[in-house]
Amino acid sequence: MAIYEPERMWWNPLSKDERIWVGVALIWMLVSFIFMPIYHVVGSQNPPSETYKVTAEDFDKLVEGMVAKYKVGEENGFPVVHPNPSEPIYVRASMWQWYPVLELEKGKTYRLHLSSMDIQHGFSILPINMNFMALPGYDYVLKLTPTTTGEFHIVCNEYCGIGHHTMVGKMYVK
Amino acid sequence: MPAHDHRNEMEAPGVFVLALIFLAVFVVIWFAHLKWLMDVWGVQ
Amino acid sequence: MANFQFRTDPLSGLKIEKSSENLIKWNVIAALATLAVGGLMALLVALTRWPSVHLLGATNYYRFLTLHGIDALLAWIIFFEVALVHFTSTVLLGTRSYVPWLGWLAFALMLIGGGVINVIVLLGGADVMFTSYVPLKADPIYYLGVILFAVGALLGFIIFFINVTLSKRDGGYKRSLPLGSFGMAAGSIIAVLTLAHGAAIFIPTLLWALNIIGYVDPAAYRLVFWGLGHPSQQINVSAMVAVWYMTAAFVVGSKPVNEKLSRTAFVLYILFINVASEHHLLVDPVLSTWHKIVNTSYMMHLAVLASMIHAFAIPASIEVALRRQGFTRGLFEWLKKAPWGNPAFSGIAISILLFGFLGGITGVIFGTEQFNIIRHNTWAITGHFHGTVVAGTTIAFMGFTYLLIPYIFKREIIWKGFATIQPYLYGVGVATLSIGMMSAGQFGVPRRHYDITFSGAPFSFTFDPAIDMFMSMMGVGGVLAAIGGVLYILISFGSIIFGKKIGD
């Protein structure tokens, strides 16, 4: 019993049902594992890993440079930016806003640089529901290809202080 | 006393059936997530 | 030989020594007390996230959520696990506690650390959540409390190794530990590795909070913190599985179907579970793709295989035992005739079922590198770990309490009728809550979020109206679970204080 010491010989062969179960469980785990590297080759949704170290000041300059160059309007005090798809685009997270509002083109692939000015934030594109981390000191590059058009929101989903629930940004895909 | 050899026996047929149901549910939910993943934007 | 006071428990036949009995008692009492606080916080938090109630203000919501994590996830479970350490390294072997002083030192450190954390969080000095991701800063006292608690827990788990080593000398066992102790051995080994990670991250963070060092790298913090945060859940899994085996043995007299299989599965936990903790970092910058795939996923799958083995082996041992008792008709007569009215049995049965279907399946899927894109930091994650830690570990420990009270406290369980329904009530509540969270998370509802109507935000976003139903499911489930939790606390404390004395 589980509460008594086992018999002297306990290294015994498995019964039929145990053998089959361990076998199918192992096969299913291998399938689930092999899926990951394979999907990196055949799939179009994979977690990026391209990262650079960056200071808040330097990143802020890059963001403002993009805004100055490609600003097309303003919404609720935030600049609306329509960048050239062949150039890098930037999203800045800080307590408690996503800056600026981006206008992207459907089907184009953008190199979106993501970083935080202060503490950790969670970059969640809704309602499409894609989620990535924005860390201070690191520039995380997402090669993002919007495939649907409309109005999207960026919600912070990593707790970042008392104003966390007001940290909502906006994004358009045209 | 030599241990009784269970090698060709189904010791717990009831649990075996329940376990296969579990695995089936697992596989279905897994593929549902694959579909949901393929519906989102491209990201690399 | 010195004079040690042993007694033989009339119900279980266990040989119990006095100092070990006291250590188990006080660790269980501390566990119950912290669960009471953690559970109250849970109810308040659930009632806030239920949009039609939205009980608390933002400050209190985040404060109580932080405390809920500390008390329900850390304190309740680790106090109970240290009680299990004492139980499986002394009582189960029929030998004494060799280092009771160390047991009390560990207990005192955990109690002081836990108390410090509770006070500083309630005073508003640490609204940083359970994870306290840098550079979000708490009062240094908070980190000190965590360190004190962790050192106490580390000593608590070290006691396991001291006791089992010396027990062999006194004939506690001849060759191998009983499976229940073997499982706690796995848990204790994982605990030592886990708590070492805790020291590696909380000591620098404390120094940083004291302005002695200037900078803690946020990415490195996440990596090492989860070396503490996730493997500590694997201590829970090992302890929970040990409880499954022991309860099945105590209640239906079941014998592991194959000791080789069950023990190998525990070894898989030790080998693979600690490095499998990085699925929190799958959509983080810094780590390379292969690092993510190998560490989180390759290793995780071998640990999951172990869980799938246990989840088969334990019900199988119950089936074999009940078939031997004569319930052999068809595939499922044994299942119908199982002792469903015994809360210790129904506790582990519900725990096995919900841990597998709710926590287990979602754990593997959300921990798969690509799927994490659509699940990371959504409420689905919260749903997942309420399926593992609450519906799995907590219910298993609740069930085991119904054995510890007669065996260790020598008291009969009061309110037998309520005790019979308690695991069901709690199980249905947590399952409803967990499914509600997972379903809302599918639509991107964030975790740890005060207001998903985003009042006061520069842009307003409205979720798919389908989430209303899932949010309400969470709320109703939370209330049901709270009722089940209150019943558990009342029955346990009531039995310990007012229950009819057994034996003597």
Image (spheres, coloured by chain):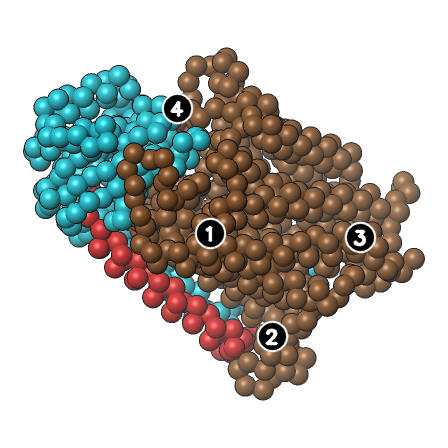
Q: Which mark is residue C361?
A: none
Q: Position of residue C293 (x, y in %)?
A: 32, 45
Which residue position is annotated with label 4? C217
Local secondary structure at mark 3: helix
Dot in front, 3 or 4 = 3
Residue type (three-letter) at the residue carrying disc 2? Val
One can see residue C489 in this view = yes
Q: Position of residue A174 (x, y in %)?
A: 11, 44
Most distant residue in the top direction: C212
Of callouts 3 and 2, the N-terminal one: 2
In the rendered structure, the answer to whether residue C443 lies left or right of residue C256 reads left
Above or below, comparing residue B12 to residue B36 in the picture: below
Local secondary structure at mark 2: helix
Of callouts 1 and 2, the N-terminal one: 1
In the rendered structure, the answer to whether residue C435 lies left or right of residue C262 reads left
| Chain letter for the residue marked with disc 4 in the picture | C
Local secondary structure at mark 4: loop
Residue at the location (60% across, 65% down)?
C424
Q: Which mark is residue C496?
A: 3
Q: Which mark is residue C52?
A: 1
| Chain letter for the residue marked with disc 2 in the picture | C
Q: Are marks 1 and 2 in contact (CB under 8 Å)?
A: no
Of callouts 3 and 4, the N-terminal one: 4
Q: Which mark is residue C320?
A: 2
Residue type (three-letter) at the residue carrying disc 3? Ile
Q: Colour of chain B?
A: red
Quadrant location of residue C501?
Answer: bottom right
Instruction: Estimate the spatial distance between the alpha carbons at disc 1 and disc 3, rounded to whole Å.
Output: 38 Å
In the rendered structure, the answer to whether residue C163 lies left or right of residue A76 reads right
Instruction: Estimate the spatial distance between the alpha carbons at disc 4 and disc 1, rounded to whole Å.
Output: 40 Å
Instruction: Estimate the spatial distance between the alpha carbons at disc 1 and disc 2, rounded to whole Å.
Output: 49 Å
| Mark 1 and mark 2 on one chain | yes
